[in-house]
Amino acid sequence: MNSRRDFLQKIGVSALALHLAPLAGWANNTTNNEKTYDGKVLRVAIMGLGSYGTRVAEAMQSCTKAKLVGVISGTPSKVKAWQSKYGIPEKNCYNYENFDNIKNNPDIDAVYVITPNGLHHDQVIRVAKAGKHAISEKPMSVNAQQGQEMVDACKKAGVKLLVGYRMHFEPKTLEVIRMRQAGEFGKIMFFQGQCGFTIGDPTQWRLNKQLAGGGAMMDIGIYAINGSRYMTGEEPIWVTAQETKTDHEKFKEGVDETIQFQFGFPSGAVASCLSTYNMNNLDRFFLDGDKGFAELQPSTGYGPIQGRTHKGELTQPITTHQTVQMDEFAGIIFDNKKPVVPVDGEEAVKDLKIIDAIYQAVKTGKKVDIKLS
Ligand code: NAD
């Protein structure tokens, strides 16, 4: 194992980072810079200045339609560092106790919640009550009931709720979706999603049931769940699932290490997926139809995504996912723009219902029906 990977695993960064090309390198490849943009800019405050929050902040420097203007953090030293790095004024800085006051701040449109999963529910509801649009990281919460409460709270407050599904804007992913919609793969028969990495530090929040809501499924398995839906274009109607746990000390009760799960779709197509915190080199989607196939590997890492179909290599441009996502979010929030694959709270509740069903299938050993509407 190389030292970079050692380091990332020690600090608890997901394996997605392992596919990372240097950020500066990607910036040159970013394609969505529309230099003439003079429309409304989405002014965003980031809550949770951790590893992914930092990545989003860096990527937002290349946005044209969104701008980082505020922070919410419990660590004053981080706030100071971000203020000087990104030119954030004192009046746009909050902590976890006082951020409800953001309701009185006309210079912030949206709050991007990038904290541990188990905190998203309460924090997003507070953001909604403060009258600001809410962006939540995935998983949106730790079960479908909480997710629905978040959707309801945002609806009641008249604000939008979006989720950081960055793959929904990724060019090679979108090309596979376009080809599938155009019938180029024929009748879809099978999807395979493999998502995992070997997690490090046993004391990190990702291995704490209260903060993570579960284990690998919440963090990385969700990519296979969401991917199985946008790759096949169908919603699963049943699931079977099996859990394997080799380390009961590290992966305590309620924190899954490895789960294999299978879906059935209305058309008769099936999916076979793996979610794990105990294996590396797993970031692959495979879609099979009776006229062709698509393979993405890496399929959900930060980039570059690579893939091929029965017609050859996919050559769509490499983008910085978080830059494109935030620019697209501005269009969705201000102009009701409709993305190819939804990124709203309802979309996230579907993933959470499926996660609930997977955990139930593991617990009961039975095939569980899934009802998403
Ligand atoms: P992290 O541990 O690096 O950062 C979490 C931040 O939350 C830290 O700044 C920490 O101080 C803060 N925090 C606030 N209250 C806390 C508490 N009670 N306990 C622990 N930390 C607390 O984690 P991360 O990797 O940045 O993940 C944050 C969220 O972003 C998670 O929901 C994760 O699933 C998501 N994420 C998404 C992607 C993606 O590609 N979309 C990638 C990584 C992480």
Image (cartoon, rainbow, N blue to C red):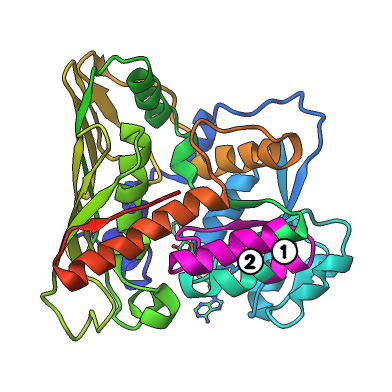
Decide which of 364, 348 is in the foreground and name it.
Answer: 364
Visible in this render: residue 6? no
- Disc 2 vs disc 1: Cβ atoms closer than 8 Å? yes
**Residue 128, numbered label:** 1
Range of magenta residues: 126-155
| Amino acid bearing label 2 | Val
x, y percent for residue 9 = 30, 67
| Quarter of the image where one finds residue 129 | bottom right
Q: Which three-letter amino acid code belongs to the residue tagged 1? A: Ala
Residue 285 position (above or below residue 276): above
Q: Which residue is mark 2?
A: 124
The image shows residue 128 at horizontal and vertical percentages of 72, 64
Give the residue at x 18% y 65%. 258
| Element under disc 2 | helix
Look at 69% across and 51% down and name the residue there: 160
**Circle number at residue 222:** none
